[in-house]
Amino acid sequence: MSGTVPPMSSLWFESALTPAGWRRHVRLTLADGRIATVAPDAAPQPGDERHAIALPGLGNVHSHSFQRAMAGLTERSGAARDDFWTWRQRMYAFLDRLDPDDVEAIAEQTFMEMIEAGFTRVGEFHYLHHAPDGRPYANIAALAERIAAAAETTGIALTLLPVFYAHGDFGGRPPVAGQRRFITDLSSFGRLVEGCRRAIAGLDGAVLGTAPHSLRAVVPDELAALQAAYPDGPFHIHVSEQTKEVDDCLAWSGQRPVAWLMDHAGVDQRWCLIHATHADASERAAIAARQAVVGLCPMTEASLGDGIFDAVDFQQRGGRWGIGSDSDILISAAEELRLQEYAQRLSRRGRNLLTGAPDRSTGRSLFETALAGGAQALGQSAVGLMAGAPADLFTLDATHPALVGRTGDELLDSWMFAARSTPVDTVWRAGRKQVSAGRHVRREAIETRFCRTMKKLLA
Ligand code: NGQ
Ligand code: ZN
């Protein structure tokens, strides 16, 4: 990547969370954007960049970056009872006016905020394909190219998930006007995917996946065709987020949506089921048995009034999950993980519910579960502070008041549950320093462009 801070070749940390647990005095050497060696109990050497606390970067499994621009603008009641579906109407009305420059400016700001929060990879579930009038751009992947450009500018690793969206509801109903910018058929989707492949070709570490939007947007034959045409890479779908979707799926097929997928689609380890909020016990057991990842988006699920996924039960069944920022209403890995645990506490009236075993740290358990689930869902084979993994990592500021005096797992617990402001200090992606003292190296230019865009959009 051009113009960013050159990669450091050696780093030294007072403590670091490795796959073998916390280690002290850890020296990393980096080569070609990867971790070459990890040496615990090592003395720092001249030229090492030294920091206090190192953690591996997290994957953000689910984002619609354009929605960042409407954050805070749907918090006023409408004429009738507000819910997910009235929010969706407002979202459709908002995206009506976005041009390609707007899409890129918003994605830059969003991805910058992610990387400042400790997310080093994003799964961008990209369905805004066409011009405001619904006609494809001359290049059908024009907006996907803007997403890729924003990833390049910010340095975040991109798992691009081009979305197939053909229908408005179960049974192949026609799309509504608000969905006109999303619509493809199988053949135009094929061209879109090729355009996406070209768009990410020069992007370091980029991964291409496939994303049927939901069972509302695809008919069974199309879903089967997508799986056959795109047999590799992550495969993501929204499912069972709303009780209305469950009811409509039952009316259409006689089955609940996750159960339908289990019987009619080859759900396996490359699948990421986004939300799965209303999966029942047998559906949760089936997801766990297939080793698919559930993409939980706690802040968005709270914001939209979706409900609470029973993550405690799912974890007890061996289920895997990752976190996503989805609507990007507020971007914070720590806050997503905190709410993930707090939602379980509120519904089950207990504490430390997601540790999976006695005498374990909640922060550590949440972090490691989301790290592994995020990597699987975003198509990464190796993550963590170990040789061979990408050099995607961040530090916490040991002098932050919420972290003073803490060691090991207490650092994760205090970061997630007790820090008012973010202690994320320095972030490297593929060995390049993208965030220093909590600020992205290009923050000023990115934020200036974003603010100009927002003033124009809201004028
Ligand atoms: C989306 N977002 O595609 O942006 C969806 C809403 C839908 C979330 N589900 C639209 N959070 O599901 O139809
Ligand atoms: Zn979504």
Image: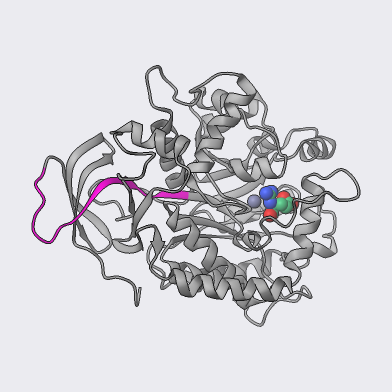
Q: Which residues are magenta?
A: 42-59
Q: Which residue is most to the right?
A: 79
**What colouring does the structure picture have?**
one colour
Residue sitting at x 44%, y 67%:
154
Say which quarter of the image contains residue 131.
bottom right
392 part of magenta stretch: no
> Going 70% across and 37% down the picture, which residue do you hit?
260
Q: Nearer the viewer, residue 322 or 338?
A: 338
Residue 50 lies within the magenta run: yes
Q: Quadrant of the N terminus?
A: bottom left
* x then y, percent, for residue 198: 49, 74
The correct choice, above or below, for 369 with respect to 119 in the image is above
Left or right: where does residue 351 sit relative to residue 426? right
Q: Position of residue 448 (x, y in %)?
A: 53, 74
Question: Please, is residue 10 above or below residue 352 in the view?
Answer: below
Visible in this render: residue 197?
A: no
Return the x and y of residue 345 as percentages of the image width and height: 58, 24
Residue 158 visible to the viewer? yes
**Residue at image point 41% right, 19% down:** 357
Percent position of residue 453, x then y? 63, 74
Q: Residue furthest front?
A: 401
397 or 393, nearer to the observer: 397
At horizontal 65% and vertical 71% (from top left) the residue drawn is 454
Q: Is residue 116 above or below residue 450?
A: above
Quadrant (top left/top right/bottom left/bottom right) for the C terminus: bottom right
